[in-house]
Amino acid sequence: MQKTNDVTGKPISRIDGRLKVTGQAKYAAEFNQNQMAYAFPVRSTIGKGAITAIDAGAAEKSGGVIKILTHENSMRLKPLNNPMELFMVGGLLGENLVPLQDNKVHYFGQYIALVVAETYEQARAAAGLVKVSYKQETAAIELEKELPTGFKPQQMFGEKVQINEGKAASLINAAPVKIEQTYTTSNENHHPMEPHATVAVWEADDKLLLYDATQGVKGVQGVAAFFFSLKPDNVKVMSPFVGGGFGCKGGQWANILLTAMAAKEIKRPVKFALTRQMMVTNVGRRGQTIQKIALAADKSGKLTAMRHHSDTYTNLSDFFEPSGKQTNVLYSSPMREVTYKVARLNIGTPTFMRAPGETPGTFALESAMDELAFELKIDPLQLRILNHTSMNVSEKLPFSEENLLECYRIGAEKIGWANRKMEPRMNRRGKYLVGMGMATATYPAGRSSASAKIQMLADGSVKVFSATQDLGTGTYTIMAQTAADALGVPVERISVEIGDSSLPAAPVSGGSQTAASVNPAILAAGEMLRKDMMQMAIADGKSKLSGRRPEEIEFVNAKFFVKDDASKTDSYTDIMKRNNKVMMEACATAMPASGGGLGGNQAPCSTAPFAKEENSDNKKYSFHSFGAQFAEVLVDEDLGTIRVSRFTSVQDIGRIMNEKTARSQVIGGVIYGLGQALMEETAYDKRRANPVTRHLGDYHVPVNLDVPLIDVHFIGKPDRHISPIGARGVGEIGITGVAAAVANAVFNATGKRIRNLPLTPDKLL
């Protein structure tokens, strides 16, 4: 049966756009409840030690205070003996620290008490009256100082991280051409427009409702069920709209448990909304890195060895910034050595932040490639083309769909790379030095099992359901587009319900996997529903399709018709009416070809079939997306300022689900990368272990005048190996390589190589 609709890929506007611009889209903190109380935390003012006393007397007498929770009087939660226990229920704690269970202090800003009051203002005022005494210990703050006592991790989330340790040295030493340099990146903080927030409602002693700003409603459900010893079905998590996530809302943080604890204690709904300052300390960040890169090549420029060592930190977690990931994937070097050393610091736990690993890692690797090209007197684009590979050499697997050379070609043409001069300081525009730089972008293409349900009502309207999330990326819209194609129903007739843990299970909206995971399930459910309806028509003597074979029938505009005689039609509404159907539905679970289960706590729907060549379990193919980033900069030598004047990003991410929302995602990623390159940095007071860049007033991010027009292009070839949809993720790859492209352009403009991010004026002068 041939499908005649083709809505997927078109740049239609977001179906949730009107709700957002009119203020009707409700975010977690906006689900106010009757008799709701407000929580505000007391946070530690030391970096390491123990609480010896808490004096809450003045706070308890303050107006409106209902309860003050501390480690001395809080309910005991189920202990976490092994963080892997949470994986079994689909959850992931941002930090392995169950709140208010003991008196230990692990970092400045840690939650050590919670004030619950009638109003937010009363809770906040009372929190300031709580007096805490400590036995203070020396906090570990400086990465370089603590590295000698650091450790060498062997795995991260089940993947080996120490690769070929010590094996590259002889090849590097013997190479006729080599470079070896150190590159550093700073601590960076998430600052989504919507801070974290939780509203907790105990509907019964064993039944909990949570509204939470999260990238994973199923993860919050699993974590809450675990710690409060509840059945997962008795925890409902709602997050219909999320005002940005970028990784910090992918794990579950202490605010979720604290809010539910407080609501349980006072037997009333409670809201806990984080301030911008708490976003700096309590919900993770991108950890600082020190990366040592060595590249060896023959005189023609062919790589013979790559060595990438990363130093970084962790705290209360097994997570650390995996900056060597792209070095395992890019280029055709026969030897690559990737190693890590990790210190333990007393600052808040690092976590996933847009393209974790690849973002700082591509800065180091792609800066080093630029340095090698200059050493060889080879155009840096040509060096990359010379060392291009269509297979993952580390895994000895071909890439599922790879068009990186085409990305290079288009990007070079659009930015005018042919006009670039290799020698620095050769181009001026008035008082400005002008430079061009480029870098390769890459990010893994993930896919998880996911389920979706589709209902068609008697009036012809369609509803799509899945426990996924929309972080502002356009998930609502591409889900509707996929359903429209599967059913041949106009997008305007389709509504989407997501962000509800009671819906068919879906994975966390992280790792750029949502489109590749959820949309195949929607496609399968739509096809199941359409085929069920067609069989009803074929079996119905009153239908003009009666007795026809399925291959003779096409569908469009909510009706079936015979291929060779378009006058013989039957609408979906007529078919349902004749068969006394008020509603028809289908639910499908789309799994990777390996057959992996959903995880978490929900059984799958009918399992969708998959083609033999479709394989996302990494046994036949290596799944990655690729791109090329090109930057032009203007540098004022007198002031040391850098302005990005033009930027071109070309991405190979498989099938484009919606050209408008995908373009927006890449533009957002590039802007994120410009912030990393030029201004973002979280600094700490080495005496007190507190962050001194505490909010958006002193943590600088790009604004309109910092951002040029960003020219975005897509290859758009479907990756049929990852799923029937052919789409890979777009959310994260846009940031990778951006900082390196800018830094390489600055070198081309000035002749000065800056290896330490951000590229602030003091480093250029």
Image (cartoon, helix red, strand yellow):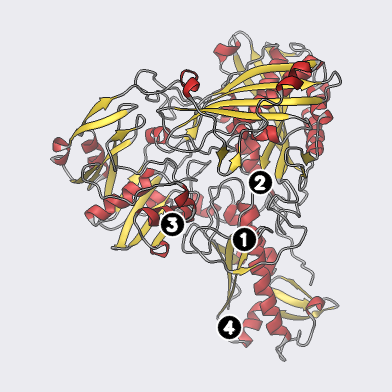
Q: Amino acid at mark 3?
A: Met
Which residue sits at x=66%, y=72%? 528
> Dot 2 corresponds to which residue?
662
Q: Taking 721 as reference, is 165 left or right? A: left
Q: Which badge, 2 or 4, comes first in the chain's sequence?
A: 4
Which residue sits at x=45%, y=54%? 239
Kindly indicate whether the residue at mark 4 contacts the one at mark 2 (C-beta within 8 angstroms): no
Q: Which mark is residue 480?
A: 1
> Dot 3 corresponds to which residue?
238
Label 3 to label 1: alpha-carbon separation? 20 Å
Label 4 to label 3: alpha-carbon separation? 30 Å
Expressed as whole percent of the image width and height from the top left, the position of residue 704 reads: 57, 30
Q: Amino acid at mark 4?
A: Lys
Q: Amino acid at mark 2?
A: Ala
Which residue sits at x=67%, y=46%? 445
Quadrant placement of the C terminus: top right
Expressed as whole percent of the image width and height from the top left, the position of residue 342 reads: 52, 28
Label 2 to label 1: alpha-carbon separation? 15 Å
> Dot 4 corresponds to which residue?
581
Expressed as whole percent of the image width and height from the top left, the position of residue 283 reads: 43, 38
**Quadrant position of residue 254:** top left
